[in-house]
Image: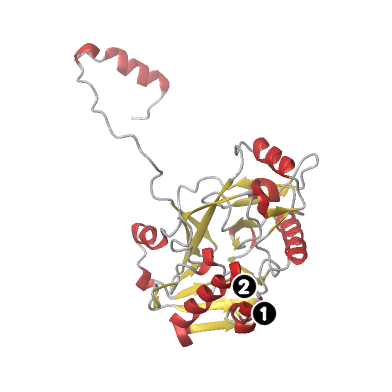
């Protein structure tokens, strides 16, 4: 029977009263939850299914930002209903499942930071075994992107080929660059080198933009690191650009793309890359996903209002993947 308001009300009025509300048993008490359900979200991108997986989160102090005062940063956070600093920002990874292969874009931090390192458990919860990953595509080799690639010198994805831009691989595995780096950054070189060593000749550096594996093309988005890349899956409005670390603090860097962060290897180039890409994806209505946008991070960049350059519109929940 088609359920309309009229026949629903009529049926309800005609039904006999079987119990008195006072006689219903008390509801059992449940424990108060202390966290979210497993943060996994799926969407279609072209012919692929993309699964966003949260590895955890970071808390960033606004003192890491450049070209903005702490007061202005706090005002933007307040305007976005994000409370007071520090800023909580996600650490995300993306699984791309196609007809003939499964690819993983970035691997999280593997516990390098207190509230991270949950990727493998959450992949398993999503029904994706690490053994089934054919390719790992790295946006860059910072600890919160490459940390989950290996553990104790052994690959976490034992059957995967690892793809990374040659400039990125060469920079972070250079002993000369490590020696020239500040003492606080030398550990980043060690972690990147260890991850590359764990995979040996299964690390396949690529040069330039273009298709890395069938169905996924690299975009050179240099500045944050020397070989930082994004990955395009599908085309047009049905596609998805996983853009890596174009933004770290979304409520601030969308309205103020001139704001940099101390993690940028080449600050001015990172800002120029961000400005150019935000203009492009807003103009072309390109759907994007980022590693440091609130989970699941999928959405569109649009022109802002007033003195704000851009805004981010999260994608609506996709109920059906058919």
Residue 208: numbered disc: 1
- Residue 172: quadrant of the picture: bottom right
Looking at the rendered image, the quarter that the C terminus falls into is bottom left
| Other residues around mark 2 within 10 Å, as few (<14) / some (14–19) / many (≥20) | many
Residue 122: numbered disc: none
According to the picture, the residue beneath numbered tag 2 turns out to be 218
Of all residues, the one furthest to the front in this rendering is 183
Residue sitting at x 41%, y 44%: 36
Rendered location of residue 149, percent (x, y): 45, 71
Circles 1 and 2: CB atoms closer than 8 Å: yes
Looking at the rendered image, the quarter that the N terminus falls into is top left
Task: Check disc 2 and report its element: helix, strand or loop.
Answer: strand
Rendered location of residue 148, percent (x, y): 45, 67
If you read the primary sequence from the N terminus, does the residue marked by circle 1 or circle 2 appear first?
1
Residue sitting at x 41%, y 24%: 4
Vertical relation: 35 (above or below) 60: above
Residue sitting at x 31%, y 18%: 11
Vertical relation: 198 (above or below) 71: below
Residue sitting at x 43%, y 60%: 117
- Residue 101: quadrant of the picture: bottom left
Task: Check disc 1 and report its element: helix, strand or loop.
Answer: loop
Rendered location of residue 156, percent (x, y): 39, 72
Q: Nearer the viewer, residue 128 or 76?
A: 76
Indicate left or right for 17 with 62 as reference: left
Vertical relation: 289 (above or below) 182: above
Indicate left or right for 67 with 13 as reference: right
| Other residues around mark 1 within 10 Å, as few (<14) / some (14–19) / many (≥20) | some
Task: Name the colouring of the figure.
Answer: secondary structure
Label 1 and label 2: CA atoms lie apart by: 8 Å
Disc tally is 2
Rendered location of residue 35, percent (x, y): 40, 43
């Amino acid at each position: 029977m088609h359920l309309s308001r009229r026949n629903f009300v009529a049926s309800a009025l005609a039904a006999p009263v079987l119990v008195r509300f006072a006689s219903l048993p008390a509801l059992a008490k449940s424990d108060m939850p202390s966290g979210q359900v497993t943060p996994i979200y799926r969407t279609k991108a072209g012919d692929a299914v993309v699964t966003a997986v949260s590895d955890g989160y970071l808390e960033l102090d606004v003192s890491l930002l450049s070209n903005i005062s702490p007061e202005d940063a706090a005002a933007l956070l307040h305007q976005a209903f994000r409370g007071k600093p520090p800023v909580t920002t996600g650490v995300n990874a993306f699984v791309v499942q196609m007809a003939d292969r499964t690819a993983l874009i970035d691997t999280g931090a593997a516990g390098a930071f207190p509230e991270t390192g949950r990727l493998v458990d959450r992949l398993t919860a999503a029904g994706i075994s690490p053994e089934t990953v054919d390719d790992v595509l790295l946006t860059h080799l910072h600890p919160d992107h490459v940390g989950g690639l290996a553990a104790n010198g052994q690959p976490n994805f034992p059957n995967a080929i690892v793809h990374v831009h040659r400039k990125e691989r060469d920079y972070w595995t250079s002993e000369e660059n490590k020696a020239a780096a500040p003492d606080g950054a030398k550990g980043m070189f060690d972690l990147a080198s260890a991850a590359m060593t764990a995979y040996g000749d299964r690390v396949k550096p690529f040069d330039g933009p273009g298709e890395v594996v069938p169905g996924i093309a690299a975009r050179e988005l240099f500045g944050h690191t020397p070989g930082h890349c994004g990955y395009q899956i599908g085309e047009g409005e049905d596609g998805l650009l996983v853009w890596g670390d174009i933004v770290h603090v979304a409520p601030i860097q969308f309205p103020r793309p001139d704001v940099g962060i101390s993690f940028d290897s080449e600050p001015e180039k990172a800002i120029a890359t961000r400005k150019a890409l935000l203009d492009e994806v807003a103009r072309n209505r390109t759907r994007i996903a980022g590693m440091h946008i609130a989970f699941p991070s999928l959405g569109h960049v649009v022109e802002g209002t007033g003195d704000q350059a851009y805004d981010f519109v999260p994608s609506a929940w996709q109920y059906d993947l058919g």
